[in-house]
Amino acid sequence: MAKIGIYGGSFNPVHFGHTGLAQWIVEHTDIDEVWLMVSPNNPLKKETDLAPEAERLQGVKQAITGMPGLVASDFEFSLPRPSYTANTLRALLSTYPEHAFTLIMGEDNWAIREQWREWEWILENFRIFVYPRITTGQALTTRRSSAYDTGSKHPTTTTTNVIYLHDAPLFDISSTQIRNAE
């Protein structure tokens, strides 16, 4: 059974932070492949702010050229919109029953998990890798030394499937910064 990491995002645009993290996960965890799954329509983002999905997918394909274990995925393009993670995960299980899936997300998305559709089902049924994110004005050394408590806000939520990637590299870049610089 292949272990597949699902790293979903708008990738608007993709950058070395995305690819560097995905590559680190393949090299330093039990994940066999990371699928960078381009989301055509994230329900928590304005669709008008997104480049066309085909352009974003092409950008991911180009960015991961020569990076073993990384796959550019348009899996969500054929699913109903907006792209709810729970729907995507159900479709993945149905399409690829031979794979074990791990959801990969930044701690910024983990912090708003209650806004996801069926977030409790996701937590009960999938392993989740949470990677550190740099917030504006935050020093790298501060983030590295901080502890991560998955249960402090929601003591009744089972979080045994949540693994915080303390040693993952930190990238001081975001797609928003790149778009704003253009």
Image: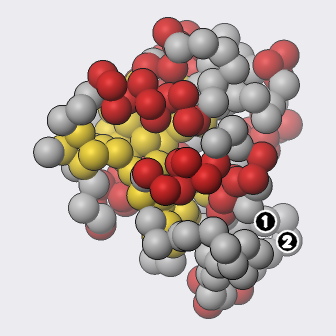
Q: Position of residue 15 (x, y in %)?
A: 57, 41
Could you tell whether 66 is left or right of 46 in the image?
A: left
- Residue designated by label 1: 135
Residue name at image x 54 percent, y 70 percent: 159
Q: How far apart are marks 1 and 2 (CA)?
A: 6 Å
Judged from the image, the secondary structure of the residue bearing numbered disc 2 is: loop
Q: Position of residue 81 (x, y in %)?
A: 66, 15
- Front position among marks 1 and 2: 1
Measured along the vertical axis of the image, is residue 154 above or below residue 90?
below
Residue name at image x 55 percent, y 70 percent: 158
Could you tell whether 18 is left or right of 175 in the image?
A: left
Of the 4 image quadrants, the one containing the C terminus is top right
Measured along the vertical axis of the image, is residue 46 above or below residue 17?
above
- What number of labels is visible? 2
Of residues 110 and 133, the one nearer the viewer is 110
At label 2, the amino acid type is Gly
Q: Quadrant of residue 134?
A: bottom right
Q: Which mark is residue 137?
A: 2
Of all residues, the one furthest to the front in this rendering is 156
Q: Position of residue 43 (x, y in %)?
A: 75, 29
At label 1, the amino acid type is Thr
Residue name at image x 14 percent, y 45 percent: 1
Q: In which quarter of the image is residue 41?
A: top right
Q: Please tell me how crowded label 2 is: few (under 14), some (14-19), or many (20+) other residues with Cα within 10 Å.
A: few
Measured along the vertical axis of the image, is residue 4 above or below residue 127?
above
Q: Quadrant of residue 157?
A: bottom right
Could you tell whether 116 is left or right of 162 in the image?
A: right
Judged from the image, the secondary structure of the residue bearing numbered disc 1 is: loop
Tag 1 and tag 2, C-beta contact below 8 Å = yes
Of residues 137 and 41, the one nearer the viewer is 41
